[in-house]
Image: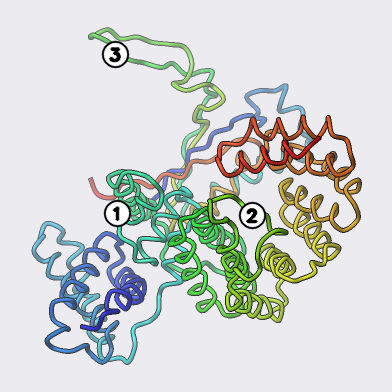
Amino acid sequence: MRYIMLINQGDSPTPADPERWATLSEAEQEQIGADYQALNQAPGVEPGPWMQPPEAATTVRVQDGRTLTTDGPFVETKEALGGFFFFEADDLDAAIEMAARVPAARLGGAVEVRPLKEGW
Amino acid sequence: MVASAEEAFRDEWGRVLAALIGILGDFELAEEAAQEAFATAAERWPHEGVPSNPANWLVTTGRNRAIDALRRRRTLAEKTRLLEAEAERATEMEEAEAIPDERLELLFTCCHPALSTKAQVALTLRTLGGLTTAEIARAFLVAEPTMAQRLVRAKAKIKAAGIPFRVPPDYLLPDRLAAVTATIYLIFNEGYGGRGELAGEAIRLGRALAELMPDEPEAQGLVALMLLLEARRGARFDGSGEIVLLADQDRALWDAAGVAAGRAALDRALALHGRGPYVVQAAIASLHAAEPRDWEQIAALYAELARLTDSPVVELNRAVAAAEAYGPATGLALIEKIDGLNSYRYLHAARGELLARIGRTEEARAAFARALELIDDEPERRLITRKLRALR
């Protein structure tokens, strides 16, 4: 089965927020980097592209034919998508295990595991 | 057909359905197939006699029906090809002596943590318990279409999300087994408040789990706990529906055979070196069933349970037991240390009781009043009101 793994950073410190990122020790920062790298190289993983933080997002709606844009993500910044990757796995248990390896999951964020539709 | 046919059917339902899910790899399809197989059996067995191996007959019939149904829906070409391969395998199986018992796989799938607790409960009762959707809806006081939808959604999620049909590997087992026992115990507790058929259903499920995992002490502990609690059911309410506290219960109304069966299960759990939360709770229930009650031992076991579960409710029980063992002041001191139960009615009720015992009547009155504010259950309200009146 193929899953998309949606990473929500939540409150977790990321390099996009240098102040909070600095609350981590250098060793912790390196570990997080190494963990993401290991993830991207794990069998079955197809890494997604790097995304700018949710603050850089613009949300677009169309109402009565007019295009309305708002600054920021569709949900609250804290809940917005921070990144994603694809994962080919036998079953949900394997996907949950992979999700648990995503550093954001242990740093206050979460990973949503969503199966992809086969075929069309 | 014999009068107990329905009962016999229910006993076979879980096994037949589990086997069909194992073969077909699809809950919905397997359930339809199982239903058809049982309907055919109800029609034919009375005239033709019950086959020598009813479960095999039901699985084979269900599997053939599913294949026929899929052939009719040719659009699902890929699935049919898959099934034809399966059919070959299944024919080989037909000649074998017994179908594999896959109820455990089914139980772990139904209690997968990726499903909501409500869905786990409903699915477990439907698939392993063999209850109809209408029966489950009645038991949980929801409309039948609501329950039907809950079941459909749960089955759809299992399929779409790829929840595996298997007994989890050892490194996942402790957490997953805890989810299974929690679901069964939740069903039991739904029944404990009065809907006895659910309590009985939970005991059946617990016994099946213990039979399928004979080396697992927590499964035995869960069965022991449920049997010991259930044995006291007849004494828990008096003739007019009032709650009777354990200390005041008429022991003649207890089911002695139930207590003995519960203690036998507890002995098995202890022989397996069980020290988990269900084993400890069963040990406490067993001590509660003894006369006189060994409160020091009960308080010590609650302390152990509090350590295992980190639950303030358990701390409260420990405090109540300590009050019996070492006096109300000791119990009260433990209650005052509990965090996070400020809107828990039993905390205030227990506090009121202990304050009353050491003569701090005004504080006791306030505590009972606070408990009353939090109670939404009539018999409990009357119990606390009686206690308030007894204060001078």
Which residue is label 1 attached to? B134
C-alpha gap between disc 2 and disc 3: 64 Å
Left or right: residue B211 compared with residue B324: left
Name the residue located 71 percent from the left edge and 77 percent from the top edge. Answer: B270
Q: Pick the residue in front: B114 or A6.
A: B114
What's the image's color scheme? rainbow
Which residue is label 3 attached to? A62
C-alpha gap between disc 3 and disc 1: 44 Å
Callout 2: helix, strand or loop?
Answer: loop
In the figure, residue B262 lies in which quadrant? bottom right
Callout 1: helix, strand or loop?
Answer: helix
Contact (Cβ within 8 Å) of mark 2 with mark 3: no
Residue B332: horizontal and vertical position, in percent?
86, 43
Name the residue located 57 percent from the left edge and 64 percent from the top edge. Answer: B177
The reply to whether residue B237 is visible in this rendering is: yes
Mark 3 neighbour density, 10 Å: few (under 14) some (14–19) many (20 or more): few
Eye-nearest disc, 2 or 3? 2
* As drawn, B12 above or below B178: below
Query: In the image, which disc is placed on residue B244?
Result: 2
Q: Pick the residue in front: B155 or B193.
A: B193
Mark 1 neighbour density, 10 Å: few (under 14) some (14–19) many (20 or more): some
Name the amino acid, label 3.
Val
- Chain under disc 1: B
Name the amino acid, label 2.
Val
C-alpha gap between disc 1 and disc 2: 33 Å
Name the amino acid, label 1.
Ala
* As drawn, B88 above or below A87: below
Q: Are marks 3 and 1 on the same chain?
A: no
